[in-house]
Amino acid sequence: MSLVIPSDSVNIETFDVGELLRLRDRINAKLPSGAIEDINLSSELVLTFRSAKALLESAADDDDTPLSQKSAIVNSLNSLLKNLADLQKSLYSVERQQKLEAALVEALKKFPELISAFFEEYEKEC
């Protein structure tokens, strides 16, 4: 059996730097990754949208919920929808760019004499 004490009751002022670093390492090992590449942004955005929509549906017929709060939820939903639309456009653009690059690579494989001319033009543009 392990002893569980409230985290706010631990006096970290008495710890030296080494102890604090070891404690931080132990805590970091238990926390989810803080790296943005480890977050599925599109999934998180959709889940947030669904949560806000469910909140609005539950508050819509509730006479005790102030109109200002219902309006705030609607504004949040509109913002989330805009973000989702922007994300979809961005994903479409990235996918289209990848297809264009793949087609260019295949074309250059078929016509290797164009490779140097392509890179000369590319360097001028960049």
Image (cartoon, rainbow, N blue to C red):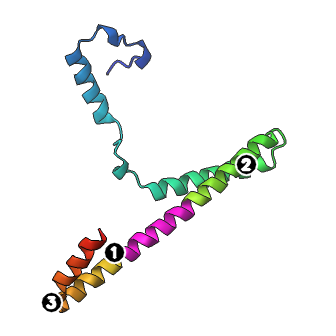
What's the distance in space between the residues labelled 1 and 2, CA to CA? 42 Å
Asked if the magenta segment contains residue 122, the reply would be no
| Image-based side of 65 in relation to 23, left or right | right
Q: Residue at label 3?
A: 113
Circle on res. 116: none
- Residue range corresponding to the magenta coloring: 84-98
Circle on res. 98: 1
Q: Residue at label 2?
A: 58
Q: Nearer the viewer, mark 3 or mark 2?
A: 3
Q: Which residue lies at the image location 31% right of the left edge and 72% below the top edge?
A: 125
What's the distance in space between the residues labelled 3 and 1, CA to CA? 23 Å
Establish if 89 lies above or below 40.
below
Query: What secondary structure is marked by label 1?
Result: helix
Percent x, y for residue 112?
15, 88
Instruction: Choose the circle earlier in sequence order: 1 or 2.
Output: 2
In the foreground, 75 or 59: 75
